[in-house]
Amino acid sequence: MKFTQQFSFFWRSFFLQTGWNYLRYQSLGLLFVMWPFLKKLYSQDKDAIPSVVSRYLAVFNTQPVMASFCFGALAKQEEYIVNAPNLNETNEEILEWNAIKRGLSITTASIGDRLFWGTLKPLTLLLALFVWLVLGVHVFELQPENSLPLLYIAAGSIAAFLSFNTIALFVKWEGIKISYTAPVNGCFGLTSFDWNRTIYNAKKIGLVLTVGLILMGIYYYLRDFQRSIDVQFVTRAVIIVFFVCISFITRRLRIPNMYLYLSAAAVFNLVCYL
Amino acid sequence: MSVTILAVCLLAALLELDTTYAFQLTLSRGIIAGPLFALITGNYEAGIQAGIFTELLFADVSPLGAILPPSATICCAITVALSSMGIEMCYAFLVAVFGSLLFIRTERHVRKQRVQLLPGWEERLLQQPGKINRIIFFELGACFLINFVLISLFIGASGAFMRWLQPHIPLRAFFACQFAFMAVPWIGLASLVPEFRLKMR
């Protein structure tokens, strides 16, 4: 694949989800990503374009970063369709194209959701919190009247932004090339990474960091109250322990955190008036 | 509405596009959007606190499949904007959580409405596929405008309401909201443990 073609897929893939809708999900975005390639490929056979476009406008939904694997694989298959020697072969290649589109979008969505949304996003959040804590920004109880240097404020955000995007953009860029060049029996390049091991290791790191952060939070909390252990200290400690315990329960019951927070605000107001 | 608040609304509308419609470079995350809003208002601590608390509170909801998580950008924008209007952080954050929940409902409605436009677009694209660029950038522009109008309206209305209400809120209610606000990072962190543990192989 030429660099310009790869760059075109890469740049346009940032708009894959524009026009997202409940009927065909990312279909408009997929056509937007593939259109320059299709225009060039079918420059000699303009009559075929409406039927080609209608294929791309069918249902398509996957994880936006991992979608790059679909672009490369679909582009390769589209070339097989164009170069098919007769009508029967063309129809077979089109059937194959549909199967690739469906199968690969489901597989990449599954990997991408687990890797990027389920693991990397919370992991980079923890990284940012650690950076802030190391710089002395007390992330658990900030006092708005305190002034922090701008560099300290930016450090955590930049750490999270760079760590997430370095991996995401690398996978996005490489995914296009790998899926285009990989043999069909090589799962369109998906097997060139050990996704399960990567996710497993990242989750292990995440677990250690989370427990570490909770312990650091407790340390900061105790350090602030070293001088006087009074009613306020005990009340706050009880509230923290209560919420840590109850959020484990609500997570198991699949109740979102925000409802726990809203309920807490309502219950505390009731208690204050009793 | 002051120029600062208007600038926060503009940036929020722009960053909200990053959530779904364009780029997905995670600029719309709480920990990134919060400090960015703070650059406009000048209250860095409020921005960073809004960002961290929002991100931790919404950490348990991911945009898997067609799931629409509450918008961290909207939550941060409302918190920072209300805080710069003189509203206490604990109240500002409570209003912002309601605001982001309301925004999900509107966003869902917009996506349903887009389905109505889809047949017309598809018909045009079958005849002139080159129009896809125009449709995509029209959609981006429309989303930006809708976001901007919704955010401005909500911040304007809730800001005026909270400024009127705040002096009348009793001290007990203030402490109640403060305690609930204080619990947010702990709720978030505790929910991250099963997030990492449950999905292990």
Image: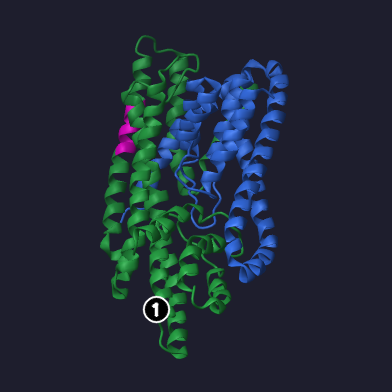
Q: Residue at image x 39%, y 78%?
A: A80
Foreground residue among A267 and A189: A189
Task: Give the letter of the green chain.
Answer: A
State the quadrant of the C terminus of chain A: top right
Residue type at mark 1 is: Tyr
Taking the magenta stretch, the answer to whether it contains residue B171 is no
Relative to A165, residue A269 above or below: above
**Residue occupied by mark 1:** A80
Numbered-mark total: 1
Q: Chain B rendered in what hue?
A: blue
- Residue A172 at x, y = what percent? 37, 54
Highlighted range, magenta: A209-217
Crowding at label 1, few (<14), some or many (≥20) Cα neighbours within 10 Å? some
Judged from the image, the secondary structure of the residue bearing numbered disc 1 is helix
Question: Of helix, strand and loop, which mostly describes the magenta segment?
Answer: helix
Q: Chain of mark 1?
A: A
